[in-house]
Amino acid sequence: MSLVGTGVIFGCVWAVYWLWKVGSREPGLPPGPPTKPLIGNTLDFPTRAIYKRFTEWANTYGDIISLKIGFSSVIILSSPEMVRELLDKRSVTTANRPPVHFVDLITDDHSVGFIDYGVRYKNMRRALLAILNREACVEHLPIQQAEASQLMYDLLKQPEAYFTHVERFSVSSIFSIIFGVRCPRHESPLVQTFFKLEEEWEDLLAPGHQPPVDMLPFLRYIPERWAPWKASCESRMQREAHNGSFIEHLLQEREKYGLTRKEVAYLGSGLIQGGSTTTTAFLRTLMCCLATHGEVQARAHDEIDRIIGPGRIPTIEDVQHLPYLQAIIKEVHRFCPSVPYAVPHYSTAEETIGGYTIPKNSTIFMNIYGIYHSEIAYTQPSEFMPERFIQTEFGTVAGADDSSRRNDLHFGAGRRICPGMLLGNNATTLAALNLIWGFDFRVAKDAQTAREMHVDPNTFTESFIISCAKFPADIRPRSEIHSSLIRAQYSSSRAFFHHFEQELSPEDKAFVETW
Ligand code: HEM
């Protein structure tokens, strides 16, 4: 055989071998579901309820698993130890975000939640912490308290619209804090525009819902007619989806923070996005869990009645005296963590952990849902049982190794941990406290059988942010004394709200006059 012929055969064998290797798990990677040549685990990647599949895989393959998506490695961490080792301790090399090209297209690479961990990110983070640090969050409390008073008032007047009242509460609180404009009703143009965009955005964010442009980078070069998602991203850019409004403090100080005007505007929208859907999800889950767990609600009412009573609206200072309420809040985060697999991190250097090699450029998911639903760490993890947090600090079984556990794992890890943690905690705690103080949550009765309808609190929504699904609710004030206090409190909040109502639409202005 000629030299050329030998070369061709050798080349073919090598090409077949190389193609066969693409998609297979390299030695040293953590275990995971079997791969297929070329595509690896691409077809295994779920399109809905991703956190459930991650958790099934964790039960089969362990606390750290890997997937192969084309050439890339995906790592899924399902224990506090693994999170601590890889995301907390080695946060310098695991603080990046995976390339998500459609996000770059939509935001012109300005989204604080998705930009690379570099100088621009650090400037943004420094600016964020200036308005989200402990002292600043204390200053935001009057807004949150006033908005919580409208939340109670809304529920009093229109209990059947509970699902949207909590959304209004969350958006209005955060808009007031960030942009100085509030949203007095769910139909406010600001709320409607925001949620329309947010819905589309979240749909795009759920892995599997988007085309695999990021996992298989060559797809970026597919001609336009075969890639309608690219066109839709570009149309978002043209629509100027983010309103470009300003954050007064940041605009004044932007040179100190090294930010451009555009970065300030995007920071504002990043905060609204990060803060509103998560708080809404928490409150929806809380209401469903209270309605379906009468004994939990009765115990919480009993505690609140003993410590506060019906004669005054509670404030955040009361929470330290309410251990059962604190346990309920922790259990809501555990039972249905709003961001079940966090926002993926991305490694910028090879790391070794538990004897495995994590290659540079790996996408790393923190399986928060899986960690909080471990059969080993928790008794009956799928049950809503706040008592577990009375029995042990982390709600885990007696004798569990909690040395790596934190009660704020649902806020993420490492250098990308949620910067809005304190503000978010204040919003959820204040709202939970006020709602439980003032109302009785039940599942509505069937008109024909007069029996409570069946509601399974384990039925969660399935997007990037999750909560208990909407349920037929019967929400009533606990007494006439509670009702009149709620009305009085809302009335006295009106003067405070006025500062944030200067730029309302005529329809919103008319609404606040009559509501
Ligand atoms: C119950 C409330 C909240 C929960 C459960 C929550 C959860 C999370 C999680 C899991 C992450 C990803 C962290 C990681 O990558 O490791 C995150 C990121 C983020 N959150 Fe929150 N969050 C909440 C409230 C808020 C609030 C109130 C704000 C703003 C005011 C906010 C702003 C952000 C931002 C900007 C990021 C991106 C950070 C980055 O990429 O560096 N969040 N959040």
Image: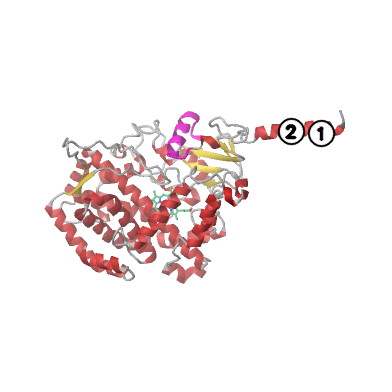
Magenta region includes residue 60: yes
Q: Please name the residue shown 46% across and 64% down the image.
A: 265
**Residue 342 shows up from this direction:** yes
Q: Residue furthest left?
A: 480
Q: What span is in magenta?
A: 46-64
Residue 112 at x, y percent in the picture: 49, 57
Residue 172 at x, y percent in the picture: 33, 60
Q: Please name the residue shown 54% across and 58% down the image.
A: 109
Mark 2 falls on what kind of element?
A: helix
For badge 1, the amino acid type reads Gly
Instruction: Please name the predominant secondary structure of the magenta segment in the image.
Output: helix
Which color mode does the image show? secondary structure
Mark 1 falls on what kind of element?
A: helix
**Residue 323 shows up from this direction:** no
- In primary-sequence order, the first of circles 1 and 2 is 1
> Which residue position holds label 1?
7
- On the rendered image, what quadrant is the C terminus found in? bottom left
Q: CA distance from mark 1 to mark 2?
A: 10 Å
**Depth order, front residue of 494/331:** 494
Label 2 beta carbon within 8 A of ligand 1: no
Image-based side of 161 in relation to 106, left or right:
left
Q: Residue furthest right?
A: 2
Instruction: Check the image and report above or below for 291 versus 13.
Output: below
- On the rendered image, what quadrant is the N terminus found in? top right
Label 1 beta carbon within 8 A of ligand 1: no
For badge 2, the amino acid type reads Trp
Query: Callout 1: 10 Å neighbours few (<14), some, many (20+)?
Result: few
Instruction: Check the image and report above or below for 74 versus 142.
Output: above
Residue 488 at x, y percent in the picture: 17, 61
Residue 255 at x, y percent in the picture: 51, 70
Magenta region includes residue 159: no
Numbered label attached to residue 14: 2
